[in-house]
Amino acid sequence: MEKGRDAIDTITGYYYQFDYYILQLLEVKNQYDTVMIEGIEDVDILEENELTAVQCKYYEKTEYNHSVIAKPIRLMLKDYANRLSLKDNIRYKLYGRYKAGHNKYPGALSVDFAKRNLFTYTKNKVKHVLHLELSLSDADLEDFLSKVDVDIYANDYKEQQTKVIKKLGTVFRCSDFEAEYFYYNNALRFVKEVATQQNAKDRSVSQKLFLSKINNKKMLFDKWYLQFKGVREYCSEVRKQYFSPSNISPYERFFLIECDGLIDDNKLTSLIVKISHNWSKLSKREVHTFCPYIYLHGISKERLIRLKKKLQQDDVRFWDGYDFFGADFSAKSIIRKANAENDIRLKILNELDLLSSVLNSASGTKEIYQFYLQEPFFEEKIYSLCGIQISATEHVGMMI
């Protein structure tokens, strides 16, 4: 159990830094300003020819002590010493979140305080006085400290994440759901890819490039994020966004579901029946009756036949576009109106290749929901297509 908590803390630290990086990219003054991850420090911001190197630390469970900020500031001092002859226009920032102890911080860093509490330390029983080892004068230290900003009141993880998502919503003029599950999701994946680049210049990204890379509504989750977010919370938010109308419109709805190797026939049948029950209206009182189409991706023909037999045994009537033994598939047959008389509660598409002809033949408004495990398996630009990534097929039941 303890190991699990440690892993979550580590992941939180990574995401905290990623979120900070994303936020800086969104807030730079010019679209051609750049932000680098894992450069001089955790995040380097080059804005209007001034470079700010930021150490981003998340110590939500740690009380503030001078020793906690000492090491990152010593690293900054070493970088400053290496640049003394270059006269670089650089600033340093420590951005940290701490559980308590904020009153211990003096509010400003004086040379005497820094010498005593930050630059003098013991390692492996050997005392070090860093400013002397670097041959820096008091004037040098005064200059260095004038370039250092320390923020020990950084946002907590959730506050910062919310700020990022709200900012993305403003930039892309979209809902909170779209901001998080499309643009923020894309941003996390992009940042992880950038952070692993060996060449430093490839870890430096302009705002213009960043926005162009994340500007698509294709849900492809980073595995860490889906685990960290929590499956139940994710499914609940998908349900609220797409599958909880108070009055269901009589649309042609297509549920395309990728099947993993874990869901058994009983659970898969129950899922099919649930979709049929929730997304059908066949009452004689209904002016416009309807029922859903379902396509199961990644299952064998033999298994599909077993599922159909089970539905038949459970008295769930359906059409699949084949009117008699040996008949060819007929889109005209499967798009017929379901109603109280024929009691058709479901329309099953046997193959993905049949979907386009059915979409072209069906009249009225069409909604397509594609549930996929890794990558979308159906692309269609003509019709409105909602892609929803899942980590397990059975989770679809918590969404619809």
Image (cartoon, rainbow, N blue to C red):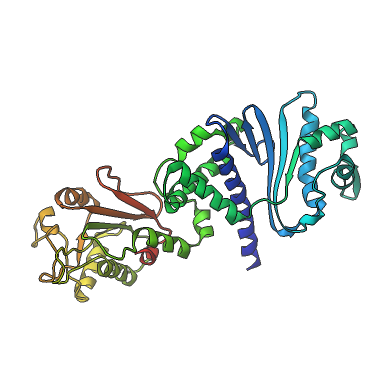
- Using the rendered view, name the quadrant where residue 382 is placed: top left
The vertical placement of 328 against 171, above or below, is below
Q: In this view, does 224 lie to the left or right of 308?
A: right
Q: Nearer the viewer, residue 2 or 95?
A: 95
Quadrant of the snapshot with the N terminus: bottom right
Residue 21 x/y as whole percent: 59, 42
Instruction: Let me know if residue 180 appears in the view.
Output: yes
Outermost residue on the top side: it is 86
Quadrant of the snapshot with the C terminus: bottom left
Residue 339 x/y as whole percent: 13, 67
Q: How many marks?
A: 0
Q: Is residue 159 left or right of residue 362?
A: right
Q: In this view, does 151 lie to the left or right of 261?
A: right
Residue 236 x/y as whole percent: 42, 64
Instruction: Let me know if residue 196 appears in the view.
Output: no
Q: In this view, does 189 lie to the left or right of 73?
A: left
Residue at (45, 60) in percent of width and height:
234
Residue 167 x/y as whole percent: 51, 45
Outermost residue on the bottom side: it is 314
Residue at (14, 58) in percent of width and height:
334
Residue at (49, 51) in percent of width and height:
222
